Image (spheres, rainbow, N blue to C red):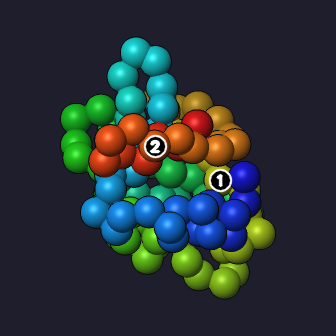
Amino acid sequence: MRVIDLILLLSDFNKNNRILVENSPQNLAVIDIQVADRKIILETSTKLNGLKNWEFLLMINKEPYYKFPVFFSHEKKHQQLFGFRVTGDQLLLG
């Protein structure tokens, strides 16, 4: 998924929803982003609260990032994101 696609999809949801990455057995909180090699890498944590939707959108909504693919980082591995689903007050990227 590209950054611009993610921005358009997430902009319709509550600004205070938490952003998480869906992962078994425990979902990962998105806590920061990194830009490297023309891609966005979401930094995750199992111990911290995730960013809220408005915080996340503020970080990624920059024109140079629009065409970059989105990946998440966990245990020093990167996996690309392809979509998301909503559960309660959480937006689960996956």
Q: Position of residue 61 (x, y in %)?
A: 55, 77
Furthest-top residue in view? 25
Question: For mark 2, what is the residue?
Answer: 86
Q: Who is closer to the viewer here, 38 or 52?
A: 52
Cβ atoms under marks 1 and 2 closer than 8 Å: no
- Marker count (numbered): 2
Residue 88: image quadrant is: top left
- Measured as percent of width and height from the top left, residue 85 is found at 53, 41
Which label sits in the foreground, 1 or 2? 2
Q: Which mark is residue 70?
A: 1
Q: Where, by quadrant of the figure, is residue 46 drawn?
A: top left
Q: Determine which of the numbered discs, if any, sits on residue 37 in the image.
A: none
Residue 5: x and y in percent read 69, 64
Does residue 84 appear in the picture of this structure? Answer: yes
Vertically, is 28 above or below 39? above
Label 1 to label 2: alpha-carbon separation: 18 Å
Residue type, numbered disc 1: Val
Q: Amino acid at mark 2?
A: Val
Q: Determine the residue positioned at 31% across, 47% down.
A: 89
Q: Horizontal placement of 19 versus 61: left or right?
A: left
- Residue at far bottom of view: 63
Q: Does dot 2 land on a helix, a strand or a loop?
A: strand
Q: Secondary structure at mark 1?
A: strand
Is 50 on the left-hand or right-hand side of 12? left
In the drawing, does residue 79 fall left or right of residue 31? right
Quadrant for residue 13, please give it. bottom left
Please report whichever mark, 1 or 2, sits nearer to the chain's N-terminal start: 1
- Which residue corresponds to the image point at 43% horizontal and 76% vertical from the top-left? 58
- Residue at 57% over, 52% down: 41
